[in-house]
Amino acid sequence: MLTAEKKKKYTVEDYMLLEEGAPFQLIENDLIMSPSPVPVHQVVSNRIAQDLSNFLDSIDDKGFIVSAPMDVKFDNCNVVQPDLLYISAERISDLVRERVEGAPDLIVEILSPSTAYYDLRQKKDLYERYGVKEYIIIDPIQETAELYSLKDQVYFLQQKIQKPDLLNSDVIKGFSFNLGRIFR
């Protein structure tokens, strides 16, 4: 009789044994590997990070903004590396240690063929469950963006736009993602 091989469930302890910079995330006890992003992904990521950083500097916001790779540990079964994250200044001391431990205020994921399923399904569910206030999904192929806001522990689609429109952040008041600039 054939029996199914029991699949190993990984924990944060297993994840921490990986070489620094290894292209893995821990999602629901599964180690998920992805290749390095395609060039357009990195260009879009850099433009968003630059725009956000410049805006935060202009209003003297002392929040924590960082691009991948940066571990975000939600629990012993889930450690992800969002493309971009922001934590408000008043929450930095609670969340930022050797890695981010807990829910950032804002997460941006840029879709890639190898990661779209995780970004649109599993990671979106994690971000909702653990209380990420704002989740933005950028699609470089369609040149679109979706902004989800957390209300009563559930994500609601606040905006869905396409190039050249502006996506207005609820978490960072006054900041807009200009898709015309991002996808120029």
Image (cartoon, grey):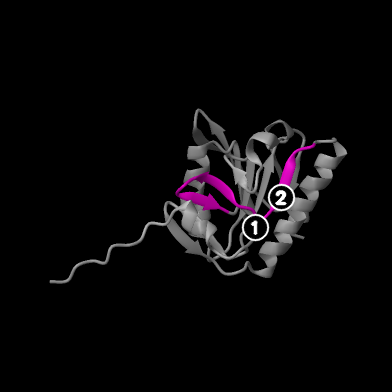
Q: Tell me: 103 left or right of 68.
A: left
Name the residue nearer the viewer: 137 or 67. Answer: 67
- Based on the picture, tell me whether residue 154 belongs to the magenta stretch: no
- The image shows residue 118 at horizontal and vertical percentages of 49, 56
Considering only vertical position in the picture, is 68 above or below 100? below
Where residue 42 sits: x, y (%)? Answer: 70, 63
Q: Residue at x 61, y 59 (%)?
A: 142
Nearer to the camera, 180 or 122: 122
Give the amino acid type for the residue marked by disc 2 in the picture.
Val
Q: Is the residue 172 above or below the residue 19 in the image?
A: above
On whether residue 78 falls in the magenta region, the answer is: yes
Quick check: can you spot residue 126? Answer: yes
Q: Which residue is mark 1?
A: 69
Q: Amino acid at mark 1?
A: Pro
Residue 41 appears left or right of 156: right
Which residue: 49% across, 32% down? 153
Please state the extent of the stretch shown in magenta in the rendering: 62-80
- Which residue does the image show at 63% across and 66% down from the upper left? 37
Q: Dot 2 corresponds to which residue? A: 66
Which residue in the rendered view is the most extreme toward the top? 152
Secondary structure under badge 2?
strand
Q: CA distance from mark 2 to mark 1?
A: 8 Å
Q: Which residue is most to the bottom?
A: 1
Q: Residue 30 at what x, y percent from top left?
A: 43, 58
Camera-side residue: 96 or 131?
96
Q: Is residue 13 left or right of residue 63?
A: left
Q: Quadrant of the N terminus?
A: bottom left
Around disc 2, counting alpha carbons within 10 Å, would you say few (fewer than 14), some (14 to 19), or many (20 or more)? some
